Amino acid sequence: MQPPHRSPIALRASASLCAAQLCACTVAAPEREPLPLQDVAPFSAESKGSAPVARWWTAFEDLELETHLEAALAGSFTLEEAWQRVLAAEAIVQRTASVRRPFIDGRAGLARSDSEPGNSAREVSLGLSAGFEVDLWGRIADAVDAEELRSTATAQDLHAAAITLSADYTRAWYQLAHARLERELVESQIETNALVLEVLELRFAVGQSGSADVLRQRQLVEASREQLLVLDARAAVLEHLLATLAGRAPQDASFPADKLPTLPSKPAPGAPAELLQRRPDVTAAWLALAAADADVAVAAKARYPRIQVSAALTTFAEDPAELFNDWLAQLAADLVVPLIDGGDRAAEVERSVAVRRQLLAAYGNVVLAALAEVEDALALETAATARIASLRTQVELAVVTESRLRQQYLNGAADFLDMLSALRTEQALRRDLLSAQLDRVLQRIGLHRALAGGFELPQTARETADAAPPPDP
């Protein structure tokens, strides 16, 4: 039997009437709370340097670093993992958007019935069925918007991961350079200590120095050699770190990092609002919050009536040869009105609102962290610069002090312990100065990372390998 004909105008009027009745008793979605930290004071330290650039590591003018870092960005498994999350999020958007389009299913059936012993009948059927939901209130559109926002946020997470990787790699690169420079410094100090030991042994041979002086100097030489073992182990660990960051096995580590950069002027931090618009982690948090807004709308509109349109075209017959002789066409539009659900939809609205407020607080934390990173980097680099100036003065004074005490000791006017203490102080200050120079570079890296925005990523090594033709057998 054919279903009764339904007038589209009457159907729409009925849907509107039911919707109006339900909307009258439905609790409206709560108003959105304003974003936190809208008015932020300027940064406490300003710089006359240039504006931040996307590929910030080029400011160090280190071609070796640039070459290896670009390779790390292309080969990193961390970025590959983040990229696959982006692809998965895009697929979710396509899946959610598919609800907007009609579905079509094909069906085939074979039925057999036995009315009495020895008397049976069979029926063969073929058909097509289609249907879709009319998005009266924009619920499906809001669901698609939510997934699109989450997909864009995932892409911003990829850029944030790339910034973190570039900062970690650059930091490890210059830590490796520092370890090698400190090794060269310690080797030169070992030579100096060995020369002093030779002088002491000669003086001991003629009775001008005691055996304790010789033993103390030998201990200093051995302590300096022990530092080489620590520095070699540190350099090996840093090479392993650089290799793994680049997606390579640590056994393949070989990096020509052997100098610290000459730092240009600090990049200008600009206004806090500019920073928040530039940083991908802040953008990702904002997009997640916007997606939660759309989720609240979806949950609220799930209480409204919805119209589902369906159509079917079927043919059936007892003899397959007569299968396409008779067709049955059906077209229907159903109005579904939620009445009693045990509070399921109301609870979903409350959950969506709570999630949005949670993401609002998370957004505030991300903004605070971004602002704090800039302020911390500015303060730490200022302190590192002042510390370097102080250590240079201390080294100059220590060199003069050690030289004079050594001369006085050789003339018999000073004690060996005083000369030994001055020598150790001077050598320690030189190592402290080198460490302070590294700290200043690391603080500059931290400032660049805090100010950095997204940058274009190179094609990953695995994508290149997949695109290449297979080798000949």
Image (tube, helix red, strand yellow):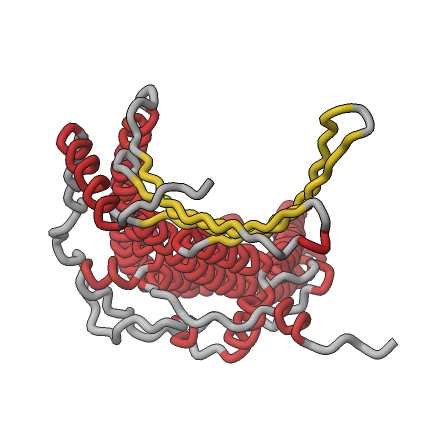
Identify which residue, 7 or 298, lies in the foreground: 7
**For this view, does 244 lie left or right of residue 312?**
right
Residue 197 found in image quarter: bottom right
**Residue found 72% across the figure and 64% down from its top:** 252
**Residue found 24% across the figure and 64% down from its top:** 269
Residue 461 found in image quarter: bottom right
Identify which residue, 371 or 32, lies in the foreground: 32
Q: Position of residue 470 (x, y in %)?
A: 77, 75
Q: Can residue 398 be seen in this snapshot?
A: no
Q: Position of residue 404 (x, y in %)?
A: 44, 63
**For this view, does 435 lie left or right of residue 143?**
right
Which quarter of the figure is the C terminus placed in? bottom right
What count of labels does the image hold?
Answer: 0
Residue 163 found in image quarter: bottom left
> 469 above or below 194?
below
**Residue found 58% across the figure and 53% down from its top:** 326
Identify which residue, 458 or 32, lies in the foreground: 32
> 183 above or below 227?
below
**For this view, does 313 lie left or right of residue 27?**
right
Residue situated furthest right in the rendering? 473
Q: Position of residue 164 (x, y in %)?
A: 45, 58
